[in-house]
Image (cartoon, rainbow, N blue to C red):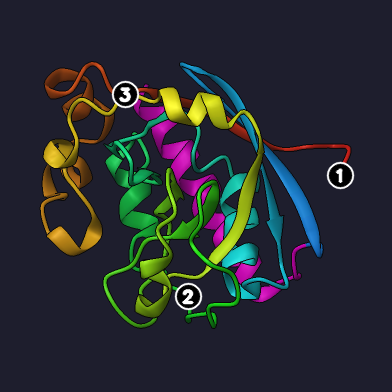
Amino acid sequence: MRYRQTLLLLTLALCWLIGVAHAAPAPDIFRVRFETSQGAFVVEAHREWAPRGADRFRELVAAGFFDDSRFFRVVAGFISQFGLPGDPAVNAAWKDKAIPDDPVRQSNVRGTLAFAMTGPDTRSTQLYINLADNSRLDAQGFAPIGRVVEGMDVVDRLYAGYGEGAGGGMRGGKQGKILAGGNAHLDAEFPKLDRLLRARLLEKQP
């Protein structure tokens, strides 16, 4: 198990280093299929909406970063948030690799996907899906990178019973136990959280 974790960490770190050295822009439009414990949904990302965010999103998916993680912050009528890996070592390798901000070109309406952040230029790996019209977030700099085009009913079913209790958002400053314990902590303390089993780029793109 320790060997597999080390290999995964090295693979993710190598993917990031390759991406830095030979960064290739994401396609103008691409789709990602998320498989979860509630079923599957598909996100369509638009690079013109937020180029830096779309590039990072594709990079994370290609690296398998989201596989076997949890939807750790689901607030009914607000958002579903994910993007903290199950292995704390993987999180440690990525959490400080922030990307510059993108201008907000689309609104945070229901079904859109955007990076979470604590302030300017702090987007790294955490994303959220808007469960309602949260256009008030636009003025705070949260730039949508895509939207759910299939399976929004699946997103709506993600377990919201813990609300902010499992760790909350980045700005709340209460994610320390997730960062340190990963899935082991979440599964022990918040066993009803839904699982993000895997995220994959679809071979047939729009």
Q: Tell me where residue 115 sits by quadrant.
A: bottom left
Nearest to the eye among marks 1 and 3: give it. Answer: 3
Which three-letter amino acid code belongs to the residue tagged 1?
Gln
Q: Tell me where residue 4 sits by quadrant.
A: top left
Q: Earlier in the sequence, mark 1 or mark 2?
A: 2
Nearest to the eye among marks 2 and 3: give it. Answer: 3
Mark 2 surroundings: few (<14), some (14-19) or many (≥20) residues within 10 A: some
How far apart are labels 1 and 3 at the CA level?
Answer: 30 Å
Q: Residue at x 48, y 61 (%)?
A: 108
Q: Nearer the viewer, residue 168 or 179?
A: 168
Q: Residue at x 56, y 51 (%)?
A: 60
How far apart are labels 2 and 3 at the CA level?
Answer: 30 Å
Helix, strand or loop at label 1? It is: loop
Residue topped by disc 1: 205
Residue 173, image x, y percentages = 12, 59
Q: Are discs 1 and 3 less than 8 Å apart at CB?
A: no
Disc assigned to residue 99: 2
Q: Nearer the viewer, residue 158 or 175?
A: 158
Q: Residue at x 46, y 16 (%)?
A: 37
